[in-house]
């Protein structure tokens, strides 16, 4: 998995929990994009918007970090989504307790959205889009670096991933 993440030249869709659109509430998938304003996050958002059907829902997930400009990130999301006719957007800003890493915060949120319980089907995020590195990428000198968040999403057992190299 890590080899594909590091050396792929095109987006990769990894399906671990196949669910048909017809089996989803309102025949709509719920796409999640991990968004921090980085170039990779923008590319992940654009790629996701291109894949979405008119009835699908977009969940933009951002962790409140020092490097994230929340207002600018929300404006970017609106502008990019509008270009592709995506109207159903849910913006989720996650607090970042100092006792947790960014990827632990995201993992907790995604886990809370993965319930198969009756009545919770519409909370399930069908696909999570992530770039191989985010805003903290500059802290690493290795050219072949897979970020912790990207690695966590790719290794999650039942999480369908749209990976953007």
Image: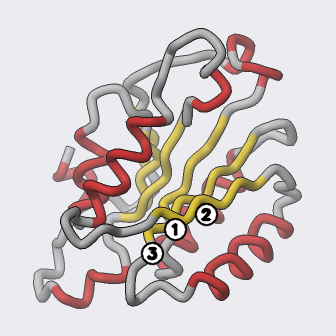
**Image quadrant in which the N terminus is located:** top left
Q: What is the distance, in whole Å, between disc 2 and disc 3 at their CAs?
A: 18 Å
> Closest to the observer: 23 or 111?
111
Q: What is the distance, in whole Å, between disc 3 and disc 1 at their CAs?
A: 11 Å
Q: What is the distance, in whole Å, between disc 1 and disc 2 at their CAs?
A: 8 Å
Residue found at x 11% / y 81%: 142
- Residue 103, percent across and down? 28, 59
> Closest to the observer: 4 or 142?
142
Q: Nearer the viewer, mark 3 or mark 1?
A: 3
Contact, mark 1 vs mark 2 (Cβ under 8 Å):
yes
Q: Nearer the viewer, mark 2 or mark 3?
A: 3
Residue at numbered disc 3: 64
Give the SS element for disc 3: loop
Q: Which mark is residue 45?
A: 2
- Considering only vertical position in the picture, is 3 above or below 101? above
Disc 1 crowd rating (10 Å Cα; few below 14, some 14-19, many 20+) is many
**Image quadrant in which the C terminus is located:** bottom left
The reply, left or right, for residue 81 in relation to residue 135 is: right
The reply, left or right, for residue 44 in relation to residue 20 is: left
Residue at numbered disc 1: 35
């Amino acid at each position: 998995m890590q080899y594909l993440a590091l050396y792929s030249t095109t987006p990769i869709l990894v399906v671990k929990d196949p669910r048909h659109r017809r089996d989803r509430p309102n025949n709509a998938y719920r796409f999640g994009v991990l968004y921090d304003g980085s170039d990779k996050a923008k590319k992940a958002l654009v790629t996701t918007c291109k894949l979405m059907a008119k009835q699908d829902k977009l969940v933009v997930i951002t962790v409140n970090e020092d490097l994230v400009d929340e207002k600018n990130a929300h404006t970017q999301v609106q502008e990019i989504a509008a270009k592709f006719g995506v109207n159903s957007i849910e913006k989720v800003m996650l607090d970042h307790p100092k006792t947790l890493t960014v990827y632990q915060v995201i993992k907790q949120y995604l886990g809370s959205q993965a319930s198969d319980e009756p009545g919770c089907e519409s909370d399930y995020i069908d696909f999570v889009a992530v770039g191989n590195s985010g805003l903290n990428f500059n802290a690493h000198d290795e050219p072949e670096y897979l970020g912790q968040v990207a690695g966590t999403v790719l290794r999650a057992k039942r999480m369908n991933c749209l990976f953007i190299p």
